[in-house]
Image (cartoon, grey):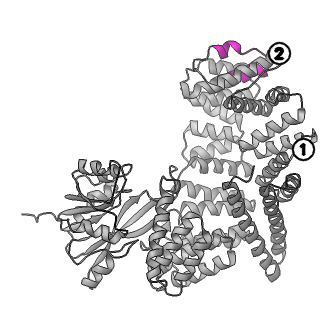
Amino acid sequence: MSAKPATITLCMIAKNEERNLGRCLESVRGCVDEIIVVDTGSVDATPRIAEAYGARVIRSPWPGDFARARNEGLNYATGEWILVLDADEELPPETAAKLKVLACTAEVEAWTFTIISPVSSAENGPRTRHLGLRMFKNRKEYRFEGKIHEQVKPSILRANPAAAVRHSDLCIIHHGYVRDGEGRRAKTLRNIALLREALAENPGDVFHNYNLGVSYFMLGDFESARKHYEAALPGVDWRSPLAACLCRNYGVCLYEMGEYGAALEMVEKGLVHFPDYPDLYFLQGQIYWDLGMLPLARASFLKCTRFRKIPPEYTTTEGVTGFMAFENLAETYAREGNFAEAVAYMILALKEKPSDRLYSRLTFLLRQDNRTGEEIAAFLGGRCGLDPQRIAGLLFEAGAFATCLRIIDTQAVPAPAALIFKAKCLIRLGRYTAALDTMAGLTADDALAEQVLKQTCICKWLARPRQDALAVISAFAVPDSPVAAACRKVNALVAGAESVDFPAEEVRRHALDLALEVLDLGDKDLALGIALALSGGSEMGEAWFLLGKHALSRGLRLQARNLLERALNRCRASAEAFRLLGTACAGLNLPREAFRYFAEAAERDRENLFHALSALEELASAGLSLVRRGLELESDHTDLRSKLFKLASIKKKVQRWKETVRREGRHD
């Protein structure tokens, strides 16, 4: 007979975790034998959810000490093994399936897991990894220690110095570090309070100082984070994984503060002790990138890509040895104008982690490498294996309309979204009748119906003579559509109405979208007519200003610059106009022009600190440009190198200051 499987008790502490607890307990269904939940004062459905999953709920007042709360649950556990999870964690299926295998490994006393923490709610957003001891044998001498960031390993090794603590090669997903997650700030403040209490008892404690640094950094209080990281350094054991994480996190803190010299020193110190830690090379590359030292940045990112495995005890960001490093390598070459190499590295990034953003960037790089539309299509289909509809969308974005049209026409039954692209291409090629015919046969669902309406109206308005689109708009089936309302207003202008009002803000935005699109298609008169109606007057400068401001809000920097300069030429000179022009030029990497416009905005609105800070940032950028050119001629020039670090530091610190002003609402 086979041995009876070892039993596992899941032990948790929870308070007001009704949003998370069900996900956690569902993930362990069938792989644990007992669930103990210590509820420390929930006023929501947390206890009921726990009981619904068969948990024994122990109601215990919060003791202000995580170790005591954890140990309370251990006192009730009857399983041979303890599994520890937080309510905002879950087991992936492959981890859950192997827990019993771990529990049957007789020679092991405790198991560590890789804790994967998404730091953004965005799909495919960045994730960090760190090690956590989460499963151990149920012995009365094995208890947690520490008021916060509690640990069980010290008690295990004290009771059993020869205890085997192994890495499971399995993962746990932790959702609690999502920066934009609900309650994240409150939990961080709670942690800081507990850590400060613990530190008051032992001010030199390395672990507590390190964790205070981490907590303050999460709040954006870099100065306090720096203070505690610095306090942790003297007592750290340089043979420990904690020392590696301290070098990484302290280096990142210094980098975010713009202390580039100190950040490099911390990285270099870390690499002496931990040459197998790729995150340190990645941070080194980021520092050199900010400084514009592209060959050095490239060398650092290349080192990242040579790692095949990261020691599990190191905290790491997923992708530093792969797609993130490859993307950054591509950008170093792109900045130098070597687009062929940039394309090669972008392909490597995409192979590891495909995304719409990277495919869009790849298409741009191919265009910059002087590839024709047909060559880009062949590349995206052959090298990347993209389907025709996706290729068509990327080609349209790149302005390769004829090739986009050909790709769509090769499809036996094009999807509705592809037919929208086809109509848009035909419009941009001046073939309005063909575009109308394409959309006439389109039975679009609600998601595409508004696009069909917009493009149909544009076809009619751009025809010569202009055509009235009222019948199409009146037949539109989606009620209360702001797009339809905007089309109706613009059509009234086309039909000769002397004045048209746009009372609703959403309708105004869609009308401005229409104005920018017809302007891009060459119909300046209609675009200006819409903008004039929106501005409520006959001032041409105000019309150009509205168009430019809206173009900038849509990320169309070059178009915004041109439109806003026309506004200035039409005497629409204001602090806001100069600020927007400065913003457009800054986005186009034109620091001298941006500085001039921001300085003028600051002169016209001296109460607005944001204008002055923006001018200072661009002045630093212009200075950096000059210094980098000097270093290209004389790379060992000590004085120029010193100025490079100082100017880069000024720029970074001004950016942080601007962000503070923006958060406080002092930038309008």
Q: Is residue 316 or residue 327 the one in the foreground?
A: 316
Above/below status of 649 relative to 266:
above
Q: Are marks 2 and 1 in contact (CB under 8 Å)?
A: no
- Give the quarter of the image for residue 655: bottom right
| Magenta stretch bounds | 456-474
Label 1 packing within 10 angstroms: few (<14), some (14-19), many (20+): some
Residue 627 x, y percent position in the rendering: 83, 72
The image position of residue 136, as x and y in percent, is 26, 71
Vertical side of 371 occupied by 656: above or below:
below
Q: Position of residue 437 (x, y in %)?
A: 66, 18
Q: Circle 2 sits in a helix, a strand or a loop, which is it?
A: loop
- Our reading of the magenta stretch's main secondary structure is helix
Q: Which residue is mark 2?
A: 496
Question: Which numbered disc covers residue 573?
Answer: 1
Of tags 2 and 1, the one toward the viewer is 1
Task: State yes or no: residue 570 in magenta.
Answer: no
Residue sitting at 49 percent across and 80 percent down? 243
**Marks 2 and 1, the one that precedes in the sequence:** 2
Q: Residue visible at 23% across and 54% down?
A: 55
Cα separation, mark 2 vs mark 1, equals 31 Å
The amino acid type, in three-letter code, at marker 1 is Ala
Residue in the picture at 52% in, 84% down: 273
Query: Is residue 160 among what the camera can see?
Result: no
Which residue lies at the image location 84% right of the left edge and 73% below the top edge?
A: 630
The residue lying toward the viewer, choosing from 446 and 26, is 26
